[in-house]
Image (cartoon, grey):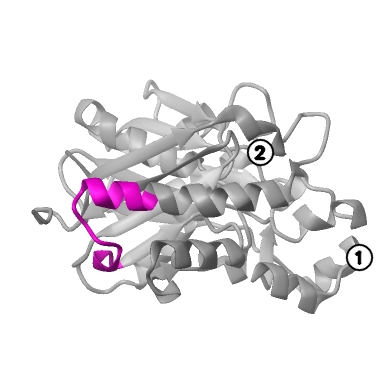
């Protein structure tokens, strides 16, 4: 048994709205908003690193959870935009938190990494106690900010999110997860060290709009839940079109899908936890209904996680 104790996030101070980005990529600001649902995003400062953003998100998470850093038994860090082949950001984040000797694992997974990290944390919490999951991305440095990179540049921003998964208690119990991968179309979303981000948008949205709702429905079915019994869905914030498609496929109103995409853009693996942090901060009441997280990303990898109010039995 594992629980979600809380979330945190950190985004750079620099706001880049569509009006500023449009001349760089040769696009119309109104068109950018129409096709993506994104009005602005954050860009990292010159001195920021994937790890430094992650450290700030982790600190915010621990503060929100009223948890001391020394209570963390394991760090899982997800990023697809790390500056090095190795080391990844996990050990640097752990060091920044003063966690000498605490194991730190990297998940180099774009977009879906936070979800996979949450699921892994739930399985490992019984052994490590408190597992800190951090997802951090600086996507503005891996896209082409010119007309040749328009289709990706208009989507992405920078930021970091974190969550604390515990074996002893929290505001929600992680009840189940469903994770899947298939490398057949892996080249459709890739980032080499010597080239900018490549994304075949048509292929990615086709697979994401089919596979993500299918995973959600399979997870709910095996837990004897209907989609309309879920209070909130929190997805990887890829673009508004995808969120709309998933809501339609699952068969629930789009209003049940928390969305902060317009203000941050697609922050890859960080987006799920940034969204979760803002949703949780704005939720004044105790969790009363099931909560579903879902993501799709490079690999291709996708899945869903189900959380329930603590102690609430699943429907028969």
Relative to the observer, which residue lies in front, 254 or 47?
A: 254
Q: Residue at x 76, y 61 (%)?
A: 154
Local crowd at mark 2 within 10 Å, few (<14), some, or many (≥20)?
many
Query: Which SS type dominates the magenta stretch?
Result: helix
Task: Decide if residue 82 is on the left or right side of residue 133.
Answer: right
Residue 169 % position (x, y) = 16, 47
Residue 245 drawn in magenta:
no
Q: What label does residue 173 carry, if any?
A: none
Residue under circle 1? 26
Q: In the figure, residue 264 lies in which quadrant?
A: bottom right
Residue under circle 2? 81
Q: Residue at x 82, y 70 (%)?
A: 20
Local crowd at mark 1 within 10 Å, few (<14), some, or many (≥20)?
some
Query: Disc 2 vs disc 1: which is toward the camera?
Result: 1
Q: CA distance from mark 2 to mark 1?
A: 25 Å
- Classify mark 2: helix, strand or loop: loop
Q: Residue at x 37, y 24 (%)?
A: 102
Residue 218 drawn in magenta:
yes
Task: Decide if residue 86 is on the left or right side of residue 278.
Answer: right
Q: Quadrant of the N terminus?
A: top left
Q: Earlier in the sequence, mark 2 or mark 1?
A: 1
In this rendering, the answer to whether 206 lies above or below 265 is above
In the image, which residues are magenta?
216-231
- Classify mark 1: helix, strand or loop: loop
Q: In the figure, residue 276 lies in which quadrant?
A: bottom left
Whether residue 160 can be seen here: no
In this rendering, the answer to whether 140 lies above or below 13 is above
Task: Decide if residue 261 is on the left or right side of residue 23.
Answer: left
Residue 267 % position (x, y) = 60, 53
Residue 316 % position (x, y) = 8, 53
């Amino acid at each position: 048994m594992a629980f979600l104790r809380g979330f945190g996030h950190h985004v750079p101070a620099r706001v880049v709205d569509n009006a500023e980005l449009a001349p760089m990529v040769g696009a119309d600001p109104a068109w950018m908003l129409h096709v993506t649902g994104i009005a602005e995003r954050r860009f990292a400062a010159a001195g920021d690193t994937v790890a430094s953003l992650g450290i700030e998100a982790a600190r915010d998470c621990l503060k929100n959870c009223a948890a001391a850093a020394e209570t963390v038994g394991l760090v899982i860090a997800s990023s697809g935009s790390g500056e090095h082949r190795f080391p990844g950001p996990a050990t640097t984040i752990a060091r920044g938190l003063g966690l000498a000797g605490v194991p730190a694992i990297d998940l180099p997974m774009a977009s879906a990494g936070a979800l996979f990290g949450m699921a892994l944390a739930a399985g490992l919490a019984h052994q490590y106690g408190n597992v800190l999951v951090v997802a951090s991305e600086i996507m503005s440095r891996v896209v082409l900010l010119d007309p040749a990179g328009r289709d990706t540049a208009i989507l992405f921003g920078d930021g970091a999110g974190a969550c604390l998964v515990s074996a002893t208690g929290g505001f929600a119990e992680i009840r189940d997860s469903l994770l899947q991968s298939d490398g057949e179309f892996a080249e459709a979303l890739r980032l080499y060290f010597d080239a900018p981000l490549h994304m075949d948008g048509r292929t990615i949205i086709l697979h994401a709009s089919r596979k993500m709702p299918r995973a959600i429905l399979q997870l709910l079915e095996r837990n004897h839940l209907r989609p309309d019994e879920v209070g909130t869905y929190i997805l990887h914030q890829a673009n508004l079109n995808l969120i709309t498609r998933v809501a339609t496929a699952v068969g629930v109103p789009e209003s049940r899908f928390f969305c902060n995409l317009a203000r941050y853009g697609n922050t890859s693996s960080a987006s799920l936890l940034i969204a979760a942090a803002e949703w949780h901060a704005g939720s004044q009441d105790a969790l009363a209904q099931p909560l579903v997280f879902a993501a799709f990303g490079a690999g291709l990898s996708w899945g869903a996680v189900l959380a329930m109010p603590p102690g609430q039995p699943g429907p028969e």
